[in-house]
Amino acid sequence: MLGSRTHYVERRLGVKLPQDYAAFIERHGIHSVNGVEVYGYDERVVDPEKIPCVIGATHLYGRDYRLEEGILVISHTGVEDIIVLLDTSTGSIFEAGADTRRKVASSFNEWIAELETR
């Protein structure tokens, strides 16, 4: 069963979230892992159209990075203009610049596990 946070994000972005990312949102909302802020959704966020909310991050970066439907912005690497993307259709995680994109994990849980070991 979907939690209220997951349902809100899915409705606002018009996507079906992968189960591992949905579980993260329900458990943590928005969370920092070893200094990396992972965007999600927490009802205490003042404005969901701003970072660190996944909704705001996806809308903000979506135009500049020409993101396809179903691609969400879930973090910023800290390196100028490099963002972290979640493909909701496959669950894969990518790092992307203005003209580049490379797969860094096959799932959200794999990506988080890598962050935790840094």
Image (cartoon, rainbow, N blue to C red):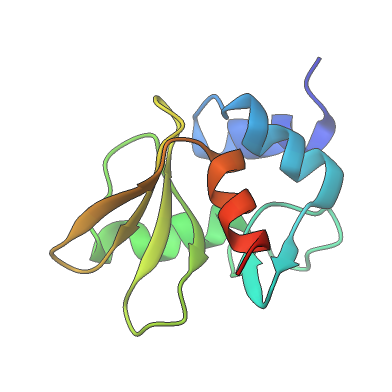
Residue lying furthest top: 1
Residue beneath the point at 59% across and 69% down: 50
Q: Position of residue 38 (x, y in %)?
A: 63, 61
When the figure is inspected, residue 107 is found, relative to residue 117, above or below; the finding is above
Q: Position of residue 56 (x, y in %)?
A: 54, 61
When the figure is inspected, residue 34 is found, relative to residue 12, above or below; the finding is below
Count the marks: how many? Answer: 0
The answer to whether residue 67 is left or right of residue 9 is left
The answer to whether residue 47 is left or right of residue 84 is right
Q: Nearer the viewer, residue 59 or 88?
A: 88
Residue beneath the point at 62% across and 59% down: 39
When the figure is inspected, residue 75 is found, relative to residue 93, above or below; the finding is below
Q: Position of residue 30 (x, y in %)?
A: 74, 59
Q: Looking at the figure, which quarter contains the C terminus?
A: bottom right
Residue lying furthest bottom: 80
Q: Nearer the viewer, residue 45 or 1?
A: 1
Q: Looking at the figure, which quarter contains the N terminus?
A: top right
The answer to whether residue 17 is left or right of residue 91 is right
Residue beneath the point at 46% across and 81% down: 78
Q: Nearer the viewer, residue 25 or 101?
A: 101
The answer to whether residue 109 is left or right of residue 79 is right
Q: Nearer the viewer, residue 29 or 93?
A: 93
